[in-house]
Amino acid sequence: MMQRRRDRRLVGLALAATAAITLTACSASDSGTSAPAEEAELEGRGPIQYVSSPDASGAAQATIDAWNADHPDEQVTWVELPLDADQQRQQMVQNAQVEGDAYSVLNLDVVWTSEFAANRWITALPEDALPVDEFVPATVEAASYRDTLYGAPYYTDGALLYSRTDLLAAAGVTEPPRTWAEMQSACDAVLALPDAAGMSCYAGQFDKNEGLTVNFSEAVASAGGSLFDAEGQPTVDTPEARAALDFLVNGFASGMIPRDAITFQEEQGRQAFQEGGLVFHRNWPYIYKSLSADDGSSAVAGKFGVSAIPGENGPGVSTLGGRNIAISSFAENKATAVDFIAFFTSREQEEARLALSSRAPVIPEFFEDPTVTTTYPYLPTLLTSLENAQPRPKVVAYGATTAAIQDEIYAALTGDKDPETALADLQDALTAIVNG
């Protein structure tokens, strides 16, 4: 029975990812680039570099240390990039454009994989390098370009709504909000409590970086819209996108979203919720570990819960998140890199990292294993989020696409443009990018 339920869920996960294939094909054709049909030769053994953002949990470093202990002649050195996702991508792109060999194994946001593959900045993986049939199908799709695997799924992500269940209960709110209006109503009840003095209602990630693209994409999808249609044409000057942007703009204007949230990336939002400043917070699963800490560092340990993000008229739609591990086309010692990636994404290491970081694994059995979900009760909720998740635009010109979204949506949130103008300008900008 559990296997049949899992199979049905995996079908849903696969469908969530395949919606972006048309965008990939259109953009690749427009750019004039194409990925090699066959795997490049993966030769050479020796030291390699793992290139990634910081990992405060220490989970990735523990995996590297385990590898290094058994491979004295094939040591892995961590090259740490900035925490900001856009800066990470920029540095990786710059290294690829000069064909630098300083980066071997790249930790890529799932949405960058198509761009890097189309530009031949990463190398296709051998067909037998990974047990892909054991992974969540959506993660394999997100790691592929033109039916070829270019990355190894590292962890997967869907948005979760973290809520102060202790204060909600005190205010008589017994169910998590399913809609934006219900979230506002719940906040009104909680913020009237003396114990909620100085708190704000809600925050996501609204700084002018990739997090803003994610949060806007989710809001549009949660209002019944999309950023692009099935033919790869932008659809942001629509009533659905307007409803989504109005929700965010009005949230800042009314104080539902605190003013300082305009600077929030993931960590700033996590800190605000963890310190007791927010009733609700949209973030990824990785913060669960920090929020639950019982060493005095979390003011909300034992006082919060997780649920699906809300939408305009019902449960919201998460953006499909996560990371892939890929090999730079210009790296030396690619044979070592292949073996390291297989080790890094193995079941054993996935389980070890879950214990250290609460990063969501890419192996579906973890989501329903009672011995795991007892410790990580958010996993079933996350699986539901992933079943309904939608990918960001899977386009070759992703850098220009996300920059345009950030420019216009940030201008609306800060009051530099009214929502109608911002969406019209965004429609024009994305149309120009898509049509070259």
Image: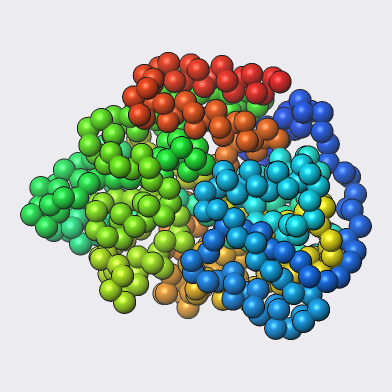
Instruction: Specify how the rendered protein is coloured.
Output: rainbow
| Rendered residue at 78%/70% (across/down) | 47
Q: Residue at x 49, y 40 (%)?
A: 209
Residue 387 seen = no
- Residue depicted at 84% across the width and 65% down the height: 333
Place residue 107 in its image quadrant: bottom right
Relative depth, front residue between 62 and 331: 331
The C terminus lies in quadrant: top right
Tell whether 38 sits left or right of 230. right
Could you tell whether 345 is left or right of 35 in the image? Answer: left
**Horizontal side, residue 200 vs residue 94: left or right:** left
Q: Tell me the quadrant of the picture where the N terminus can be found.
A: bottom right
The x, y position of residue 88, in whole percent, is 60, 49
Does residue 311 lie above or below 346 as drawn? above
Q: Is residue 347 visible?
A: yes
Q: Residue 245, how many percent across, how many down?
A: 39, 28
